[in-house]
Each structure stands twice: as C-alpha cells, then as structure tokens.
Amino acid sequence: MLIVAAVVVVAALAGMVASTPVLALLLVIAGGLVVLRRQELMLFVILFAALLVPIQINTGTDVALNVTALLVPATAILWFLSMILNGRISFLPSRLNRPLFVFLIAGLFSLLIGLVLWDPAVPRSSHFILVMLAQWAIVAFSAIALLLTANLVRSERLLRRLTFVFLLVGGTLALLTVLPGLGAALQLHRLLTVAFIRAPLWVLLAALSGGQLLFNQGLALRWRIYCLLVIATSLVYCFLLQRAVVSNWLGVMVVLFMLAWLRWKKLRPLAVLLIILLLATGILLPAVYEFAGGEAEWDESGGSRLALIGRVLEMTWRHNPITGLGPAAYRPYGFVEPLHYGNALWWEPRISSHNNYVDLFAHFGMVGLAIFVWFAAETARLGLNLRARYTDGFAAGYVNAMVAAGAGSLVIMLLADWILPFVYNIGFDGFQASVLVWLFMGGLVALDNTGEGGHSYD
C-alpha cells in the first residue's frame, strides 16, 4: 500500500511540473534504483555508451569528457554503495589487485612529487593540476573498469552474454561502416563514437571473435559464420581501408598470430622456422616496412615521432627519471625549448610521444613503468594459468582471446597511447575504445573466481 501511495503522489507532483528534464530525472532515478541492486547491468550500459554515445562534455579546460568516462566512476560508486548497504566492503582475490592498486598509488605520488619539484622556469596555468588529475583519472578509470567486470560478473553465463552482446553490436556496426556507401547512407557518423576508428576496438573484435571460432567447439553454426564475418570485417578495415594506420593492422595481425599459435601447437616449430628464414633472407622486415608506407610514411611521421620520443625521454631523464614529471606534465615542460627536426624549428612544441611506454615513463618515471610491467606480467600469467583450466567451450575461447588481445595491446602501445591515453593526444575520446579492453580483461579475474577450480559464488 505504501508503494502504491508513493507512486500516486509522485505521479501527481510530476504532472504539475511535467517536462522533458523532469521525465529524464525520473528515469535516471528509477534506473539508479534498479542498478543499485543489479550493478552488473551497468557493464552493458558502459559498453553501449562506449560504442554509441558520442556526446562530449566541456570542462572549461583543454580536456573534454564523455559519457563513458563518467559512467565508469559512477558505476564504481554504485558498487561501493551496494557493498556498504550489505555491510561488507571487499574485492575478489586476484593476482592483479596488488599491482593495480600500487600503480594507482604510485601515480598519485608522482603527481605530488611533480608539483613539489616543479621547475620554476617552466610556466603552467593555474588550473593545470586539473589536467594532471585528469591524466591520473584515465589510469584510475581503466583500472576501475577491470575491477568492475572482475567483481560484478558472478557467473560464466553473464560474461558470455556481455561478450556476445559486444560482438553482436560492435561487429554489426563495424560491418556497416566497412560496406561501401552504407555507413554514409545510414549517417552512422552521428551515432558512433570514435572507438570505431581506434586500434583497441579492432584488436578486441578480432580477438573475441577469433577466440570463440577457434576454441569454442560448442559454438553454434550461425555464430561461427558471424565470427568469421567479424574477422573478415576487421581484416578489410585494417589492411585495406585503413592501411596507413599501422596500429590497426599490426594489432590485428598480432592477435591472429597469437590465436593461431595457441590453437595449433604442432605448427609452432614451422612458424618459428619460417620467421627465422624470412629474417635471415632479408625479406620480412623490408616487406613490412613497405606495407607500412615505406620512405613516404617515414618522412611524414616516422622520423618526427622519434624526435618527439627523444625529447620526452630527455626532459624526463634530466628532471626526475625515478618518479617522472607527474601526469601530463611533460606537455608544459616541452614548451620551454624549441624542437629541431630536420630543417624545421618548432618554437612552442605541443609534444606528445605517441608511445604509451614513453608516456608512462614521463608521467610516473621508472617506478611507474616497472609497476605497469609487473601488472602486465601478472595478467599474462593469469591468462596462461586459466588456459590450463578451461580447454573447451565459451570460457576457453574467452581466455585465449584475452591472451591474444593482451599481446596485441602491448604491441600497439608502442605506436600510440592506445591503452592508457594521453589527455593531450588520444585523450578521453580514445578512452571510449581502450576502456573496452580493460573491461574484458576483468573477465579473466571473473573466470578465475567462478567455475571449476575457482571461488564460485553463484
């Protein structure tokens, strides 16, 4: 009776001030009450937002936010509220927890030390600390995304649904963008986020579809055909339509090679022998170099990228190689001295290293970079251990897919800030693609705590 009375009162009050914002507010409140009890539903919301909500939010600084970047911490808050209401705050056990938390704490220390040791000869704006916090937030939100999937996905069935929803939505939209003229006719550019032009999305699509195709023996025929179609779409987009973007086709190539390596053990010696022969005969590297654009591409961007990397490394090593300059701090440091490249002189260089490892060194120093390597090693170890536990079915396809996606991600990090975006380069726009990789990496922890041999709480 109380519920009925409350509904009547709310309906009467809302009717007096009926408007679109009031309706939206009521829907948000209702949705919040639902996800407070079922926070795992927010994983699907984050997924859809990363793919289909291209809304930018101005912050008054050079850094713009988007809905995806806001949904991740909002979901974490709902999750903590739920744990508080249940009287217990805890994280599922995982070998990834410690390096993730240490990495975030080290990032905050780098921020504080960077401010304390800031070179007075380097000017910075009064609100630059907000930019530094935004850079740290990208790292924190990425880690939170992994922890959300790890702790909210409490069954293999839910992880399977999340995976196939991503494959169905992401794969179909990717196909529509690749088909000649269809994407323009449907005006998909108004609907899709920039995730569809970012390397992490294509790495993840190729990995998850290839993993299910090669390792899930019980996969239905219609899904096998669909996964083949998604892989074909990834190949067409990366190797034909966007051949100039090396990160795309190199990431997908690494993923497919890793999946084949994991699937066919007997072919591994032959593959190693073939690679050695191609290297020894001088065929492989020149072929890859020419496919990537050759001298023209090197003159356009390759050499200049090395110059930018050299400047970032030099600045960081000169001022503080141990804990770095602080998150995003190398941008104002780069303004101080003009950058020479060839016959050109850049008076106020807006420097970006276009390399995730160099960025991590500049942001967090050797300490932060070492902790990230620790995290990557623990993730690889977890994935390889899970391969021994899951040898068939969806879980086997998923585990092998994420091992391959991890390898692909580590490679494309060499070519740009794809996985931990730099706020002044790929930024929160790129986070809409990179967060998907972090979300699905969390699925490895979820599988480790469910099913046979895990800590099932279903």
Image: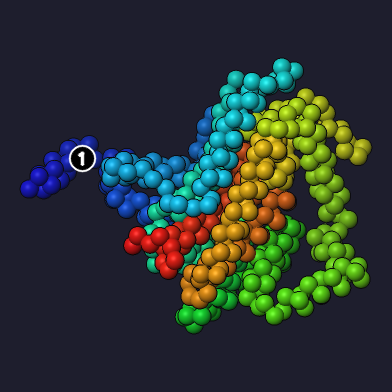
- Image quadrant for the C terminus? bottom left
Identify the residue position indicated by label 1 in the image: 14
Residue 348 relative to residue 223: left or right = right
Name the spot of residue 159 as percent of width and height, x first: 43, 63
What residue lies at 67% left-to-right and 54% top-to-bottom?
410
Residue 414 relative to residue 184: left or right = right
Number of marks drawn: 1
Image vertical order of residue 434 relative to residue 361, above or below:
below
**Between 205 and 405, which is closer to the camera in this rendering?**
405
**Between 108 and 430, which is closer to the camera in this rendering?**
108
Q: Residues within 10 Å of mark 1 (few under 14, many from 20)?
A: some
Q: Residue type at mark 1?
A: Ala
Q: Dot 1: what SS?
A: helix
Name the spot of residue 378 as percent of width and height, x first: 59, 53
**Between 418 and 345, which is closer to the camera in this rendering?**
418
What residue lies at 38% left-to-right and 62% top-to-bottom?
456
Image vertical order of residue 315 relative to residue 7, above or below:
above
